[in-house]
Amino acid sequence: MIQTVETLIIGAGVIGSSVAMHLAKVGMTGIHVIDLDLEGSLSSSELNAGGVRATWVQPINIEMSKLTIDYFSQVADQVGYKPCGYLWLHPEERWNRALQARDRQLEMGWPVDVWDVAQLRNRVPFLDKTDGIAGAMFAPRDGLINPNLLKNHYRDVARSLGVEFEDRTVLRGVSYEDHSQSPIHASCERFEKVMSHETKLEISASASHDLGRAKVEYRAQRMINCAGPWAFRVAQILGYSTPARPVRRQVCIFDGRDVDLTPYGMIVDTSGVYFHPEAMNGLAGFANSDEATGINFEYDGERFFEERIWPALYERSTAFERLKHVTGWAGLYEVSPDECGIIGSVQEGVFEAHSFSGHGVMHSYAAGLVLAEEIVFGRSRTIDSALLSGERFKTGKLIHENLVI
Ligand SMILES: Cc1cc2nc3c(=O)[nH]c(=O)nc-3n(C[C@H](O)[C@H](O)[C@H](O)COP(=O)(O)OP(=O)(O)OC[C@H]3O[C@@H](n4cnc5c(N)ncnc54)[C@H](O)[C@@H]3O)c2cc1C
């Protein structure tokens, strides 16, 4: 089967769905989005912590988050946005940098309060062990979102404007033909049956497979790589390379027992462990710097909680002494060398938006908008996103963001 489309987007996570929505909003037609698994059980968009914040150091990251969170506020009920705040606990060595970053955040219209240790104890009484905290910052408009609702919101709007989403369809090869209306030929495999979790894992881990499925060909004017942690592979298929790589990241659910977290938002400890209320429990995560790159969905279980999470939390609060591990999972960060997203044009007819390095949900609306603007008008208008182009890894103009968790 051969299908002719204008735009073929690879990946229907929050980023691909947002790009599709924005392209359709500016009036483009013939947009198809393909995904191995629209449900997304291995996608980062389903496995993340749901935190959204504009408390960044670099203006481009503040702008991307601010625009995105402003949108979340407008559709808060549909996407489960709660402005319950981010509370950052800073050690001495980061305090001055955090104060400077706050000046910039305020200048750019993002409210951030500074608390000394006495105020912190007063506002959050269960944090009764404050050794090593130089001060705290609370950003009341940062908060939490339901990423599944968000992804489906982008898709619903896109579908209402004519975008088509194709499930169980994997990009396998691309060739280019000069002087043609639709110069990009993409060959895909479509799986007829619902896939088991094991099959999805197997397909996601390797570049090629032979599971007996139908071939589908697309002819397209342009293609967009929105394949998240698999973007490096899709880039290879498209004939270019990107330095982004997948890195396993684990989160766990714990039973707080002696502490009710529901009045609070996201709390980021000096150790880098972050946690927030999750229904009647807590969700905690930690991005260890010694994690190898590669596609790995293995969750370390109780060991992750006992080695990475509980010791740091117990150092912060006596109420955390009796925490109990409930469950957890591993997902993939899509990490670029400077831990900032990669958005823009790659070559004639090929574009990319991926590798948000652990913050793609909070940048998703803006990422879709700026890429759609670049495609339609030749450059982004709402935010100048030229800094985020993948070209920066060739020219050495990296973005030095250091408030990544
Ligand atoms: C544990 C964890 C915690 C996180 N916490 C946060 C947080 O608090 N806040 C935040 O903003 N971000 C967070 N993130 C990061 C965030 O989840 C990602 O940045 C974001 O979801 C990336 O979205 P995406 O659409 O680019 O990728 P994905 O959601 O992974 O989507 C990519 C899609 O591409 C598809 N695909 C890949 N290759 C092909 C192919 N060849 N053919 C067809 N389809 C293909 C995949 O099936 C997948 O569905 C976290 C991530 C993890 C893992």
Image (cartoon, grey):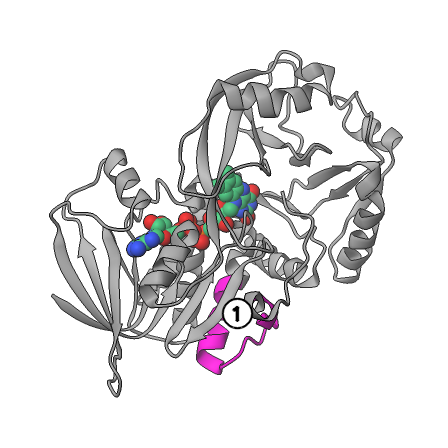
Q: Quick one: quadrant of the N terminus? A: bottom left
Quarter residue 43 falls in: top left
Q: What element does badge 1 sit on? A: helix
Point 15% across, 43% down: residue = 193
Secondary structure mainly formed by the magenta segment: helix
Q: Position of residue 301 (x, y in %)?
A: 46, 22
Point 79% across, 61% down: residue = 107
Q: Compared with residue 9, is residue 258 higher up or lower down, i.e. above or below?
A: above
Q: Position of residue 307 (x, y in %)?
A: 58, 21
- Crowding near the residue tagged with mark 1, few <14, some 14–19, many ≥20 C-alpha atoms within 10 Å: many
Point 18% across, 70% down: residue = 3
138 sits left or right of 154 in the view: right
Q: Position of residue 177 (x, y in %)?
A: 24, 80
225 sits left or right of 92 in the view: left
Residue at the extreme bottom: 179
**Residue 227 appears in the rendering:** no
- What residue span does the magenta drawing correspond to? 367-389
152 sits left or right of 367 in the view: left
Question: Amino acid under label 1?
Answer: Val
**Is 180 inside the magenta-drawn segment?**
no
- The front one of 81 and 388 is 388
Q: Position of residue 331 (x, y in %)?
A: 44, 38
**Which residue position is annotated with label 1?**
370
Quarter residue 289 falls in: top right
Q: Compared with residue 252, is residue 8 higher up or lower down, i.e. above or below?
A: below
- The front one of 83 and 305 is 305
